[in-house]
Amino acid sequence: MEEMITGAEALMRSLEHQGVETLFGYPGGSIMPVFDALYDHRDRLRHILVRHEQGAVHAAQGFARVSGRVGVCLVTSGPGATNTITGIADAMIDSTPVVVIAGQVSTAFLGTDAFQEVDLVGVTQPISKWSYQIRRAEDVAWAVSRAFYIARSGRPGPVVLDFSKNAQVDKAAYAPADVDFVRSYLPVPEPDMEAVRQAAELINAARRPLVLVGQGVELGNAQEELRAFIEKAGLPAASTLLGLSVLPSGHPLNKGMLGMHGNLGPNVKTNECDVLVAVGMRFDDRVTGRVEDYARQAKVVHFDIDPAELNKNVRADVAVLGDCKETLAAVTALLQPRDHSEWLGSFAPCEQEEEQRVIGPELRPQHEALSMGEVVRAVSDAVHSDAVLVTDVGQNQMMAARYFRYSRPRSIVTSGGLGTMGFGLPAAVGATFGQKGRTVCLFTGDGGLQMSLQELGTVMEQQAPVKIILLNNNYLGNVRQWQAMFFARRYSFTPMANPDYLQIAAAYGIPAVRAARREELAEAVARMLATDGPFLLEARVAEEGNVLPMTPPGARVDEMLLEC
Amino acid sequence: MGDKKLYTLIVHSENIAGLLNQVTAVFTRRQINIESLNVSASSIEGIHKYTITAWADAGTIEKVARQIEKKIDVLQAHYFTDDEVYSHEIALYKLSTPLLQAAPEASRTIRRYAARIVEVNPVFSIAEKNGDSADITALYRELQAAGCVLQFVRSGRVAITTSCFERVNEYLAWREEKYQRDKEERI
């Protein structure tokens, strides 16, 4: 006779079968049987108790992004589940593999407006890769296995399991499941070798090629293939925000960051190149600017694993569907070495201009107050470009992205597509569990930190070694900058009264230091990095610092403002 | 993005609760009205077929189809213009029997449109017509002008492609075969 176990116990075994070791969660009424089962598995399944369910899903995202594994989040029904919505939407748009397991009322109560009942499947369907309600204990193994398979395969994304209480407590026979096929789902389309050949032909004939690198390269573990691809034909490359750590910052062909606050060179050259090769990126409006005037002169080659991305925003002359690890290698084999030194050299005037008018003034400011950029660079230099960067959203994010430097893949965790304030702190907690031993530096603003401030409790309890660098300007800085530039300096509800962050850190037992002057910065950074465990460095930065350069909303990609 | 046309989108999916929502949500996001929608079992057991008509331009309908196909439990989504499908709708017209008897041209109209009377009682009669959308509307307008329509109802469109039969069969066979082949390669 087969052993009969509860659905909750089956969930524990299924998670272990998937290789899960860490989960982020928060208990509540409708998930209590699962937490009860977890009590017996706590030596194998490390549960990180967050302080708000939004923190659980962001932590799972941070974990997933640095580890390349599926992040798991465990919450209760109703408000517990709805609190994860922002993170699910964030994981969807940024292709992060996460499985959110939420309790649900018993099936007998479904549809009756029972206590803490919410139609989670209905709510999450449009913002998740797959959403499924487990109604029977015997379905647990299959559903968990299918959830992990869908979350991690192809273009990754969030999966929601809505786990009804009766299915948690009922008993069923358990056998581990290994779903690796769903007939209606083709995660990795067959590479189209004719398209590969056409792509190679265009690239070989190009005189002014430009490669755009997206997070898809990280997700496909194709960093080496990308490198071989650009090196063989001497192709200059630039990255999206989420693709920043694919290539080391110092690589001679790395021309920096694309987008609204990216580097001048790649943005200007986008509208001068003759062949634009996009790899694992989706032509977001923050990258393209006014799309009608985006790279019209260029032939566009687009590598992506998701058929729905091809020709979505920018029409591709050659669309190379498939896993970029395979397609990049295949196209590289057909490339001829080329000398593009003249074209590469043409980036230099842009680089000099940006250095002179933007980077220099930001890193070596003439004013007394600290600038955001110099704080970022001081930290980046002190960690020898080797840390994991986590950011919140806003000016802190753009400054960190611009001035932090990377030497290893999977080193940036940021909310790109959704732009979720409050993402940073919990994502950084998750990141510390994703690749143990690596320094995790969080750059956050005073606004974003306060959106997830309660997660300092998680940092304290776990002694999660997050180096929190708070760029405090007493403003909701990004919105303030837009108000200054586009709303006649009418600072509508962007100035913010701040608490004493050192006292807050002290209350949580987190060592902290404040740097308000330039001469205090280096020592503060050194102290932060010399301290084991968590640390808060509050940098009092210039109140009205601006992120530059900037392609104003609705402007052409190469129309970047260098001053404002 | 070019001129709008009436497209017929044919979607095959697993028969799973909540899938209709996922399919229609793709239209909602882009603020595209669904003109008609028909959902029924397909010729393959366990697989449902959606026939959806909507006005869109070529670029948009392509994106809609890809985004629908991206849903995990959707097998395939294809779109067609009117000249690529043979389509039919069915309509029922409930007519006042006394008024119908008083207006002989209404009966002639019904015959002219190749509709048939399927029910007659002293109070009302029911005419049934199948055919294309324009014909069904034209008949309704004429009967309405004759003043004898009590109720009118029409179905969504059902459509069959003129190019080939259900491609889903081949797709499923290909998927299963490829899966087995890949599995053997791994071993």
Image: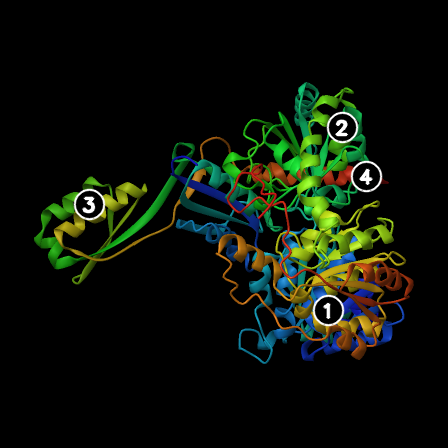
| Left or right placement of residue A206 versus residue A44 in this view | left
Of helix, strand and loop, which one carries label 3?
A: helix
> Quadrant location of residue A559?
top right
| Left or right placement of residue B131 versus residue A145 in this view | left
Please state which amino acid type lies under the numbered disc 1: Leu
Please state which amino acid type lies under the numbered disc 2: Ala
Q: x and y percent of residue A240 in the render?
A: 68, 43
Contact, mark 1 vs mark 3 (Cβ under 8 Å): no
Are the residues flagged by discs 4 and 2 from a single subunit? Answer: yes
Name the mark nearer the viewer: 4 or 1: 4
Give the mark, 1 or 2, whose residue is nearer the N terminus: 1
Q: Chain of mark 4?
A: A
Which residue does the numbered mark 4 point to in the structure image?
A: A250
Contact, mark 4 vs mark 1 (Cβ under 8 Å): no
Name the mark nearer the viewer: 4 or 2: 4
Q: x and y percent of residue A1 in the render?
A: 84, 69
Which residue does the numbered mark 3 point to in the structure image?
A: B110
Which residue does the numbered mark 1 point to in the structure image?
A: A74
Are the residues flagged by discs 2 and 3 from a single subunit? Answer: no
Q: How is the image coloured?
A: rainbow
Distance in Å between CA atoms under marks 4 and 2: 26 Å
Name the mark nearer the viewer: 3 or 4: 4
Disc sitting over residue A330 in the figure: 2
Decide: is A467 above or below A560. Answer: below
Distance in Å between CA atoms under marks 1 and 3: 63 Å
| Left or right placement of residue B156 versus residue A321 in this view | left
Are the residues flagged by discs 1 and 3 from a single subunit? Answer: no
Distance in Å between CA atoms under marks 4 and 1: 40 Å
